[in-house]
Amino acid sequence: MKRFKPNIAFRKDYNRLFREDPHAANLFILLAEMGNKKGQVVTNEQEELAVLMAARFNDPGEYAL
């Protein structure tokens, strides 16, 4: 699996979003990491994202880049 490497535009969007809502910004990272080459993410349930957020981030409100 290829490691996600954010570009400058992604970092800029993340920083802007983090100032408004840190949890949403970290969900943005999680979805980017889960996306395929076309950027598509397939998930069935909100609970699945909650479990993945808990596993990926020690504190979902903490800066992650």
Image (tube, helix red, strand yellow):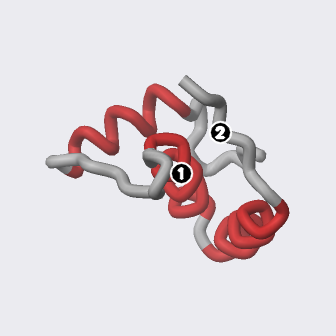
Sequence-earlier tag: 2 or 1: 2
Above or below, 33 against 20 in this view is above
Residue occupying the point 78% across, 61% down? 11
* Residue 8 picture quarter: bottom right
Q: Along the horizontal axis of the image, is 26 left or right of 44?
A: right
State the residue lying farthest toward the right. Answer: 8
Residue occupying the point 71% across, 71% down? 13
Local secondary structure at mark 2 = loop
Quarter of the figure with the N terminus: top right
Q: Nearer the viewer, residue 50 or 32?
A: 32
Q: Label 2: how many residues lie within 10 Å, few (<14), some (14-19) or many (20+)?
A: few
Mark 2: which amino acid?
Phe
Q: Nearer the viewer, residue 20 or 28?
A: 28
Above or below, 43 against 16 in this view is above
Q: Nearer the viewer, residue 56 or 11?
A: 11
Residue pointed to by mark 2: 4
Q: Along the horizontal axis of the image, is 42 left or right of 6?
A: left
Mark 1: which amino acid?
Ala
* Residue 34 picture quarter: top left
Residue pointed to by mark 1: 32
State the residue lying farthest toward the left. Answer: 44
Residue 20 is situated, as x and y percent measured from the top left of the image, at 64, 76
Residue occupying the point 25% across, 39% down? 48
Residue occupying the point 77% across, 46% down? 65
Q: How far is the residue under mark 2 from the one under mark 1?
A: 8 Å
Q: Label 1: how many residues lie within 10 Å, few (<14), some (14-19) or many (20+)?
A: some
Q: Are marks 2 and 1 in contact (CB under 8 Å)?
A: yes
Residue 47 is situated, as x and y percent measured from the top left of the image, at 22, 43
Local secondary structure at mark 1 = helix
